[in-house]
Image (cartoon, grey):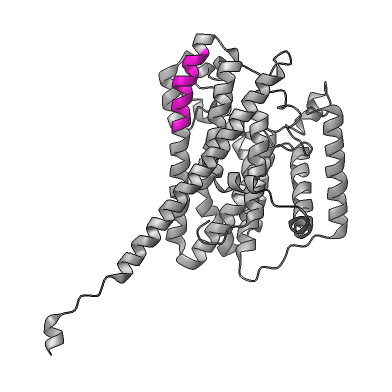
Amino acid sequence: MSTVSRRWELDAMRGLMLVLMTLTHFPTRLSDPFGQPFGYVSAAEGFVLLSAYMAGLVYSTTARRKGEAPMKSAFFNRAVKLYACQLALLLFAFTLIAGIALIVREDAVTGLLGFYLERPVMAMVSASLLLYNPGLLDILPIYIVFMLLSPIVLLHGMEHGWRGLMALSLLLWLGAQFGLGPALYQALTGWFDMPLQYRDMGAFETLAWQFLWVLGLWMGASHSEPDAPTTRFPRWMVLVALIFALSAFIWRHAVGQTPLPGHAGINLMFDKWHLGPMRLINVLALVVLLMHFAPWLKRSIPRVRVLETLGMAALPVFCAHLVVALLALAFFGSARPERPFAVDLLILFVGFYALHAVARLSLARDERKAAHKVHNLRAIASIPVSRDPVSEAR
């Protein structure tokens, strides 16, 4: 965060989301109990909302202090960095991981990379265009799209208000619940044979998840305004949010991650990939509670430095967790109850040790770059200004 001071609580929350995401993606027996631990909400919703909030907070401040051009450039540079990470992860998956999976005949990975194994050239080209997004590698592409569109959204919201933007975003989310995404895909590919199926473009329904991103941008931009008032919710809203969040939490841990087994229509209301309406309400209820109790939480809960470290290096840690998860899937396969618990502990220990090491190395590199930049600025400032000898003679 270059234009505003870091907020340790936001870093800690991002670190917590990364830990929960890692526990979910690592193929161990802890994957299920730590999936959606707070109700029918996963770490992905929290991570997307937090990332959008921080983007709105930082880049709106950049726009006010430096102008629109530096803000647009910052968003674009971030998108390029995310794209480079995505290409590196795809190269890793299409070479080493695919090779290991074919040698050991691990179905967990061959199923994950099915389209690539069937049509490798088409898969590589479409993946580089962010069209083909295998499982686990389908999160960064939506971030890239959101980053590229965010300057337009943020500037419009700052200049003309957010009411119209939020209404449009909500309409897109609603359309996604009724198949707008597949309909657009059919309309765009109806004139030619498209070997890439809609399901191969990633599990996340972008038109639905954009609502969380726009919501986060709005919240971050609003809180970055000078003398922005503290957000306060009516007591009835906090009470309703508390009742809903507690009910979802109890139901999830009593019944499981599927709210009503055998009732597909009701379960679709809680669907993660389409950000179903009941899931969205669950997310919003937790947001209300978190914002309402934030001052008390900051005073009462001790700081967990390791979470802050992970959150400060969120992108490298996120990429590293995918690398470890893919390696674990390739060598050990999916989580199985018959697997010795010691193997699961080994995966978790090695994985989290690697994530912490990546975070420390990344932060140390950033500190060296910052120190080098300061050194160069001081060196430039110490250079005496040359004078015109003719002028001095006069």
Q: Is residue 266 magenta?
A: no
Front residue (pair 200, 53): 53
Q: Main secondary structure of the magenta part?
A: helix
**Which residue in the rendered view is the most extreme toward the bottom?**
394
Q: Is residue 28 among the parts visible in the rendering?
A: yes
Residue plotted at (53% across, 56% down)? 1
The picture places residue 163, in percent across and down from the top left corner, at: 66, 58
Q: Is residue 198 among the parts visible in the rendering?
A: no
Magenta segment:
88-101
The picture places residue 101, in percent across and down from the top left corner, at: 52, 14
The picture places residue 9, in percent across and down from the top left corner, at: 67, 54
Residue plotted at (48% across, 34% down)? 86
Q: Is residue 292 left or right of residue 112?
A: right
Q: Is residue 99 magenta?
A: yes
The picture places residue 287, in percent across and down from the top left corner, at: 74, 50
Front residue (pair 217, 253): 253
Count the labels in the image.
Answer: 0
Front residue (pair 231, 381): 381
Q: Quadrant of the C terminus?
A: bottom left
Q: Is residue 170 above or below residue 88?
A: below
Q: Is residue 130 left or right of residue 258?
A: left
Residue plotted at (46% across, 61% down)? 68
Q: Is residue 286 above or below residue 44?
A: below
Q: Is residue 32 left or right of residue 261?
A: left
Q: Is residue 307 above or below residue 21?
A: below
